Amino acid sequence: MQKLIKFLKEVAAEFKNITWPQKDTLIQLTFVIISVSIIISALLGGLDYIFVNSIGLLGNSLPAQNTIQTDTSTEPQQDAIPTQLPEILVSPTPISKK
């Protein structure tokens, strides 16, 4: 318990040595950080938009190859849902006593 009290006293002493910024400086630096964050997010969003659309254009301009034929019939498939679950066989393993 003595170590904890000593630690908290040292923390309080260190807090007295901190030079806190003035209110004007704090507001200016906050404005700079928010502005830079907005600019970088807009830049990254713009690059993302360009890349997504350019890849979309590339995908649309290529000829269709290896297309998969789908079944367009309206009758339900009978084999889609199994009517019986597979039987799982589990053999009990003996427990050895030590």
Image (cartoon, rainbow, N blue to C red):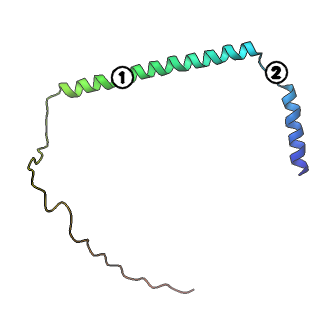
Q: Residue at x 42, y 22 (%)?
A: 45
- Seen in the image, is 39 located left or right of residue 84? right
Q: Judge by depth and name the residue closer to the eye, 3 or 41.
A: 41
Using the rendered view, name the quadrant where residue 69 is placed.
top left
Compute the Cα span from label 2 to label 1.
44 Å
* Residue 7 pos. (x, y %): 86, 42
* Residue 31: % across, % down: 62, 15
SS at mark 1 in the image: helix
Identify which amino acid the numbered label 1 is placed on: Tyr
Against 59, residue 36 (above or below) is above
Label 1 neighbour load within 10 Å: few <14, some 14-19, many 20+: few
Rendered view: 87 above or below 72: below
> What residue does disc 1 label?
49
Q: Residue at x 13, y 39 (%)?
A: 67
Q: Residue at x 71, y 17 (%)?
A: 26
Horizontally, residue 14 falls left or right of residue 32, namely right
Q: Which residue is mark 2?
A: 19
Specify whether 87 is left or right of 91: left
Q: Nearer the viewer, residue 12 or 98?
A: 12
Question: Type of residue at label 2?
Answer: Thr
Q: Quick one: 69 or 26, which is closer to the camera?
A: 26
Local packing at callout 2 (Cα closer than 10 Å; few below 14, some 14-19, many 20+) is few
In terms of secondary structure, where does tag 2 sit?
loop
Q: Position of residue 46 (x, y in %)?
A: 40, 19
* Marks 2 and 1, the one that precedes in the sequence: 2
Residue at image coords 56%, 16%: 35
